[in-house]
Image (spheres, rainbow, N blue to C red):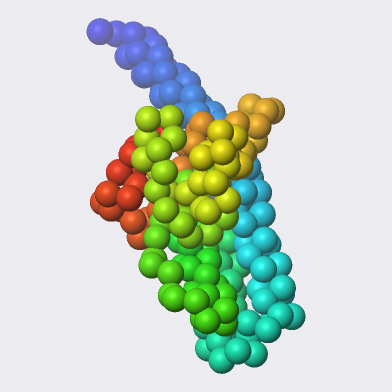
Amino acid sequence: MDYLGVVLIVATVATAFVVIARRKALQGRRVRAEQQRQLTLAKQAAEADVSAFGEELGRLAGGAEVDAGCGDEYDRAVSLHQRAVAALAEAQLPDDLCLVTEILEEARWTTARLVARAAGEPMPSRRPPCFFNPGHGPSARNIAWQHRNVPACAADAGRIEAGADPYIRTVECDDRRVPYWEGGPGYAGWARGYFKSWHGSRLIADIQSGNA
Ligand SMILES: [Zn+2]
């Protein structure tokens, strides 16, 4: 092979490398942009939950519950809220929101205990969050819905038994609102965190795939 042939081969190989590197960089930018888009959407859902829980804490602080010997539980709930706020601020990827909702699940359980104790009611059993909207807090019982057995808050269980639709949490997906379990992979971490402590539990066996 003459000198010119070698030069041409080297030039062709070099050009191919440049093209591949550019494609990879473009692909990497697209992946990062898509992750950022998903993070923005899922963060909106997590932010709504964190702020709704903050409002609930405000209501409890103004009521009789905190004065009724439940100060420690209230402090615990406040501390969990602060941890959720920090985890939300630190989230870099959609999956990072799993930690935010895992903390919120415990926080909701803490205030459920607080309210029961203040009302002189028996301590509720610890249960997974309401499937229809985990932001509703701990479920009251499981109920049959669309051939599945799902945990539901008392209000949603009552609606289903009355023949009405439950209040399903919707999220933004492709410029429309859909039930959160149809929201795509960006919401997976956010939803998973709520049910993380219940992994393997028969109470959520019908929804563990996330495809209810
Ligand atoms: Zn509910």
Would you place residue 35 above or below residue 117 in this image? above
Residue 114 can be seen in this image: no
**Residue 11 image offset from top left, x and y in percent:** 42, 17
Which of 211/120 is in front? Answer: 120
Would you place residue 105 above or below residue 65 in this image? above
**Residue 89 image offset from top left, x and y in percent:** 61, 63
**Residue 147 image offset from top left, x and y in percent:** 37, 30
Give the residue drawn at x 40%, y 14%.
12
Work out which residue is located at the far front of the displayed protein and give it.
162
Quadrant where the C terminus lies?
Answer: top left
Give the residue drawn at x 40%, y 38%.
144
How many numbered discs, if any? 0
Give the residue drawn at x 62%, y 49%.
45
**Residue 93 image offset from top left, x and y in percent:** 51, 49
Would you place residue 112 above or below residue 186 in this image? below
Residue 178 can be seen in this image: yes
Give the residue drawn at x 43%, y 23%.
20
**Residue 121 relative to residue 14: left or right:** right
Quadrant where the N terminus lies?
Answer: top left
**Residue 14 relative to residue 179: left or right:** left
